[in-house]
Image (cartoon, grey):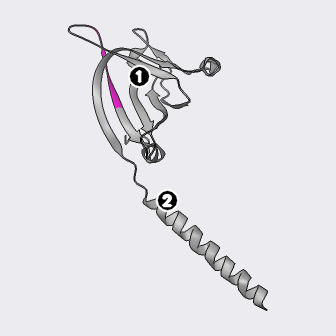
Amino acid sequence: MPCANILNVNKVLIGVKVFFALFLGATCKGEVISSTRLKVTEVVFFMPKLETSYPGLISQFGPANLRFLERVDIVVDKEGAVEGLMVVYTPSDGFRRRVFLKGIEGWMIKEARGGQFGWDVLIRVVTTDEIGSLEEGRR
């Protein structure tokens, strides 16, 4: 009978671990660390060569398609290391796209100066938990 008691104790311990994992996971709060609106003339994401071939994926927003870009979220983990970028844009087909770019090599944002043409884009630094809690139309 001692084996049966050990099995019951293990089941209880597993149950407690699962409860705490779910409880702690549910209490994690996403955070927008900083947010700003910039008037930009060009936004380019430098990605590995093989990843630019997806249909409908825009990695360069210039004068012709800059108006499609709505938001760029720079996603960081708890230690502040960049995990990737969440790019939100709506091309001329009308379907909003939220694309998470991981393993990106860099990005360039050209800010408009003086009377130069530019488009307002929201640029945010957010935590990974914030990306997980995005709701359509709310953020």
- Residue that sits furthest to the bottom in the current view: 1
Circle 2 Cα neighbour tier, 10 Å, few/some/many (<14 / 14–19 / ≥20): few
Query: As drawn, is 107 to the left or to the right of 121?
Result: right
- For the record, the magenta segment spans 116-123
- Report the quarter where the C terminus lies: top left
Query: As drawn, is 95 to the left or to the right of 31?
Result: right
- Could you tell me which secondary element the residue under label 2 belongs to? helix
Q: Which residue is mark 1?
A: 69
Q: Earlier in the sequence, mark 2 or mark 1?
A: 2
Residue 132 counted in the magenta span: no
Residue 106 position within the rendered picture, expressed as x and y whole percent measured from the top left: 48, 22
9 vs 116: above or below: below
The amino acid marked with disc number 2 is: Gly
Circle 1 Cα neighbour tier, 10 Å, few/some/many (<14 / 14–19 / ≥20): many
The amino acid marked with disc number 1 is: Leu
Q: Quadrant of residue 138?
A: top left
Residue 82's tag is: none
Residue 122 counted in the magenta span: yes
Residue 25's tag is: 2
5 vs 139: above or below: below
Q: Quadrant of residue 120?
A: top left
